Amino acid sequence: MPQLLRTTADSSVHLTGMETTAPTLNGLEPLMSIEELSEYLHVPVRTLYDWRLAGKGPCAVHVGRQLRYFVSDVHAWLASQRESEPGRAPEGV
């Protein structure tokens, strides 16, 4: 049986090229920790918490006391942040 637990060193998630519709070994969509999302977006973890308090940023899921992010939610949030034209903020921002 494949090992499902990973160490911190090899649990880094990279969204580029990640297929979000493909199920993992257990049939569930991949989740990111707040630390992994912070690393991917190159923003401090504190910024992600601040965005949550302000109602900004991607939606999260509570898993016990930890926050996790569905990779598809991160993709959708990033798409909503895209400029409609160079130099123009997305609508509603």
Image (spheres, helix red, strand yellow):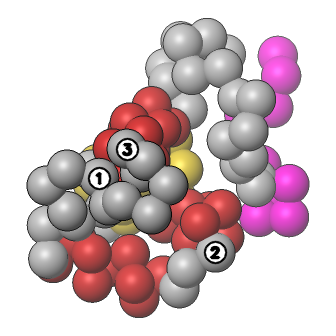
The answer for how far apart the CA atoms under marks 1 and 2 are is 20 Å
Image quadrant in which the C terminus is located: bottom left
Residue 54, percent from left and from top: 14, 77
Q: Secondary structure at mark 2?
A: loop
* Residue type marked 3: Ser
State which tag comes first along the sequence, 2 or 3. 2
* Residue type marked 1: Pro
The residue located at (40%, 84%) in the rendering is 47
State which tag comes first along the sequence, 3 or 1. 3
Q: To which residue does mark 2 refer?
A: 42
The answer for how far apart the CA atoms under marks 3 and 1 are is 6 Å
State which tag comes first along the sequence, 1 or 2. 2
Image quadrant in which the N terminus is located: top right
Q: To which residue does mark 3 refer?
A: 84
Q: To which residue does mark 1 refer?
A: 90
- Crowd tier of the residue under label 1, counting other residues whose Cα lies within 10 Å: few below 14, some 14–19, many 20 or above: few
The residue nearer to you, when weighing 58 against 78, is 78
